[in-house]
C-alpha cells in the first residue's frame, strides 16, 4: 500500500483507543503520552493490514431508507 492510500487515524479514534489502553493498564495516571503513542501506532498498523473499503467483502452495503416525503 502506498503512503498516499494509508488511512490516517482521526483524533477521536486515537483518543478512544488511548483511553482503552489507559483502562487496560489499571487507570494509573502518568502515562498519557505513552498511551497516545501506542494507540496511534496500533491504529496505523491496523490500517496498513486492512483491505481498502472498495476491496472488502465482509461488509454489505447499507440499504437506503425511503424518505417520508417520497412515500
Image (cartoon, rainbow, N blue to C red):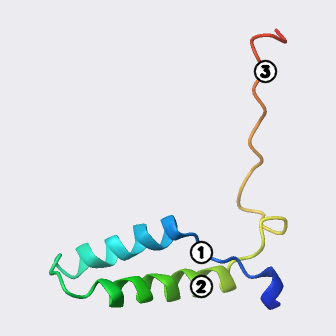
Looking at the image, residue 49 sits to the left or right of residue 51; the answer is left
Could you tell which of marks 3 and 2 lies nearer the N-terminus?
2
Residue 24 lies, in percent from the top left, at 25, 77
According to the image, label 3 marks what residue? 66
**Disc 3 versus disc 2: nearer the observer:** 2
Residue 29: x %, y % from top left: 17, 81
Return the residue nearer the eye: 68 or 50. Answer: 68
Task: Name the N-terminal-most of marks 3 and 1.
Answer: 1
Q: Name the residue under label 1.
A: 9
**In-front residue for pair 70/11:** 11
Gap between marks 3 and 1 measured at Cα: 33 Å
Residue at position x 24%, y 73% in the image: 23
Q: Residue 26: horizontal and vertical position, in percent?
A: 16, 78
Left or right relative to 14: residue 65: right
Q: Does residue 67 lie above or below 43 as drawn?
A: above
Residue 24 vertical position relative to residue 56 in the rendered view, above or below: below
Residue denoted by label 2? 44
**Left or right side of 20 for 27:** left
Amino acid at each position: 500500500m502506498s503512503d498516499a492510500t494509508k488511512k490516517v487515524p482521526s483524533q477521536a479514534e486515537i483518543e478512544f483507543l488511548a483511553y482503552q489502553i489507559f483502562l487496560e493498564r489499571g487507570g494509573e495516571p502518568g502515562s498519557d503520552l505513552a498511551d497516545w503513542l501506542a494507540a496511534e501506532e496500533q491504529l496505523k498498523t491496523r490500517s496498513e493490514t486492512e483491505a481498502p473499503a472498495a476491496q472488502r467483502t465482509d461488509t454489505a452495503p447499507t440499504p437506503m431508507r425511503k424518505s417520508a416525503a417520497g412515500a
